[in-house]
Image (cartoon, helix red, strand yellow):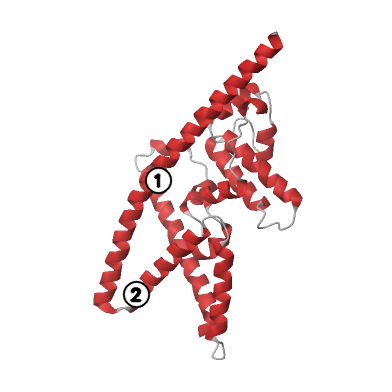
Amino acid sequence: PAHKVIDTKLYEALDIPTSATQQQIKKAYYKGSLRWHPDKNPGSEDAKKKFQEISDAYQVLQDPKRREVYDKQGLSAAQTENKMDPEIFYAVLFGSDKFKPYVGRLQGTMGVDEEMDPSMMEDPDWRERMQEKMKEKQTKREVELAVTLVERISEYTGDPSASLEEFGKKAAEEAEKLRKVANGEEMLYVIGWMYHNRSKQLLGGMVQGQYYKAQAQARAARHVAATAMSAGRAFLTFRKMNKKALADQKSQQKAKQARAAA
């Protein structure tokens, strides 16, 4: 059931009840951001405003402590100057939609489609079932990306009269567009490396193929370690920012109370 809150503006921005779970909040933010993202609504000031409102709402409601402050004291108490640009914030969480034809839906977005049923945890095999679902989604993602890649390459390989120079020019123009999005250069490098490595594994013969496979496995292991360290640093940074924001909010409240009492 919905619980009493002093203000509902942020819940309305995400079109969710005040009793929404963290998973429901994330799902609403993801779907709303997809709908109102500036890339999908070029030149629309209304979409830009809505996208900003959705991002602002999520940045408060996704944090349980800031959400509690908002529910009890309202928007002015929960707001902070440490707000991220909405497009950068979205890209950090879910990646850029412009890269979707090359990487599909990232794992950070795969879990937003379904709510975790608490009764599932009573099943001793629930972890294995969840992992199996994720594997199925991952397989579907890989197949869709393979089909998309074949379609793109067939523009050159499927047409005897196609010009390699024109094909290369078109690819360079696409790469330049992707480079300009948040973390674009880094994403392009990773995608290029992976496609190059995989092609060497498949076309390089037994010895060379095994070498590039070992290279990819070593890179993946380094990536897991680096990601864990990066996630830890990001968590500490966000925790510090949230603590500072809450401290600032308390100071502002005390100052306001003092002025009212004077």
Locate the C terminus and report the quarter of the image it occupies: top right
In the image, residue 216 lies at what x, y percent? 32, 64
Q: Position of residue 227 (x, y in %)?
A: 38, 49
Residue at image location 48% in from the left, 40% down from the top: 116
Amino acid identity at mark 1: Ser
Q: Dividing the image into 4 quarters, which one contains the N terminus? A: top right
Q: Is residue 110 left or right of residue 129?
A: right
Callout 2 environment at 10 Å: few (<14), some (14 to 19), or many (20+)?
some
In this rendering, is residue 70 above or below 180?
above
The type of residue carrying mark 2 is Lys
Give whichever of 247, 122 is nearer the camera.
247
Q: Quadrant of residue 5?
A: top right
In this rendering, position of residue 45 left or right of residue 225: right
Secondary element at tag 1: helix
- In depth, the one of 147 and 74 nearer the eye is 74
Q: Which residue is mark 1?
A: 230
Q: Is residue 257 above or below residue 75?
A: above
Q: Position of residue 79 (x, y in %)?
A: 63, 31
Front tag of 1 and 2: 1
- Report the disc number at residue 40: none
Q: Earlier in the sequence, mark 1 or mark 2?
A: 2
Residue drawn at (53%, 79%) of the image: 168
Q: Give the alpha-carbon distance from disc 1 to disc 2, as whole Å.
A: 30 Å
What residue is drawn where x is 44% and y is 41%? 234
Q: Residues within 10 Å of mark 1 (few under 14, many from 20)?
A: few
Q: Residue furthest bottom?
A: 161
* Residue that carries the numbered disc 2 in the rendered image: 200
Q: Nearer the viewer, residue 209 or 52?
A: 52
Can residue 91 be seen in this snapshot?
Answer: yes
